[in-house]
Image: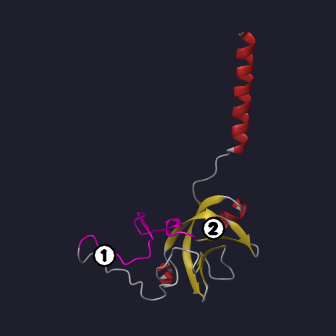
Amino acid sequence: MRNFLLTFAVVAVTCELFAAETNSLLPLKISTAEATNYYDRVMTVTGRVAQVTIRPTVTFLNLDSKYPDSPFAIVIIHGKSSYYGDANALNGKSVEIRGKIVQYKDKPEIALDTTNQLTVLDMTNSVAKLIGKPTTPAVPGDAPPIDTSTNAFPEIM
């Protein structure tokens, strides 16, 4: 019994040390400047959309600075993303994007696959999920609905 307890204690301590090394605490949210430290990890990156570039097959949201000085980009590949809203409406907005940070041409980026990866933060720091559909105000007259008729990417499901 004594050997069992000793063995159990040694295994418990070893498991705890191993878990501490492999499950090191990551910050919940990082800035665009910190993203280069977290390649190949799923993180939440926060920043302000400084530039929206829409191409026939892809849309880029450059955060915090315009291209080529942008420290981070959100990539929306048309037809491979569930985002179908007006990307231009995001210009100047503070956003959070959650996903795997990858390196492309020496810069970090996250590809948007689903709309629940992207959150728009308003002025009061309350959070509104970007769903890309027109919304109606909670109380008539609060705010106009979002117009998704421009740059709405009809080919994206």
Disc 1, SS: loop
Residue at 71% across, 44% down: 22
39 sits left or right of 62 in the view: right
Q: What stretch is highlighted in magenta?
A: 113-139
Closer to the camera: disc 2 or disc 1?
1
Residue 115 in the magenta stretch? The answer is: yes
Residue at 37% across, 78% down: 134
Residue 54 in percent (x, y) is at 58, 87
Residue 108 in percent (x, y) is at 69, 70
Sequence-wise, the earlier of marks 2 and 1 is 2
Indicate whether 128 appears above or below 20: below
Q: Which residue lies furthest to the left in this view?
A: 140
- Amino acid under disc 2: Thr
User: Which residue has dot 1 on it?
Assistant: 136
Task: Work out how far the residue at label 2 is from the one at label 1, CA to CA, in angstroms.
Answer: 32 Å
Disc 2, SS: helix
Quadrant where the N terminus lies?
top right
Residue 79 in percent (x, y) is at 57, 79
Q: In which quarter of the image is residue 6?
A: top right
User: Which residue has dot 2 on it?
Assistant: 32
- Amino acid under disc 1: Thr
Residue at 34% across, 75% down: 135
